[in-house]
Amino acid sequence: MYVCSCFGVTEKQVKDHAEAGACTPREIASACKAGTDCGGCVRSIQALLGRGNCPRRELLEGRRPAQEPAGRPEPAGSPLPEAA
């Protein structure tokens, strides 16, 4: 069944893009243009994507903060050396 009649995008295509990593209607739009013309299909795309079903989002939320680089960190607010 068509989700976006403006660009002929089907539910299957939206689901395929979601499985490939598109987690938001904007990312779906970048992949296949669905939702970029009249916008009437954006709610249908949102419904197909669901809430919180994005594997990338889970990875981002579960990620640890970046480690300090090796060596002595510079104190906050210290000026950078001027170029000669």
Image (tube, helix red, strand yellow):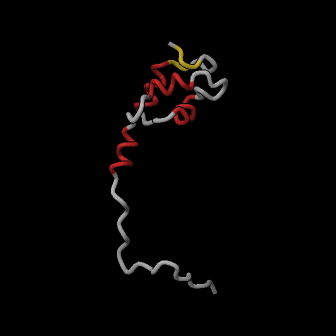
Q: Residue at x 36, y 60 (%)?
A: 65
Q: Residue at x 43, y 26 (%)?
A: 16
Extreme residue in the bottom direction: 84
Q: Residue at x 63, y 29 (%)?
A: 36
Q: How many marks?
A: 0
Direction from residue 8 to residue 56 in the image, left or right: left
From this view, report whether residue 5 is shown above or below residue 76.
Answer: above
Residue 69: x and y in percent read 38, 71
From this view, report whether residue 62 is shown above or below residue 75.
Answer: above
From this view, report whether residue 44 is shown above or below residue 17.
Answer: above
Residue 77: x and y in percent read 52, 79
Quadrant hosting residue 3 = top right
Residue 8: x and y in percent read 58, 18
Residue 57: x and y in percent read 40, 42
Direction from residue 83 to residue 51 in the image, left or right: left
Pick the quarter of the image with the C terminus. bottom right
Extreme residue in the top direction: 1
Direction from residue 46 to residue 6 in the image, left or right: right
Along the viewing direction, whichever of 54 and 69 lies nearer the viewer = 54
Q: Residue at x 46, y 36 (%)?
A: 23
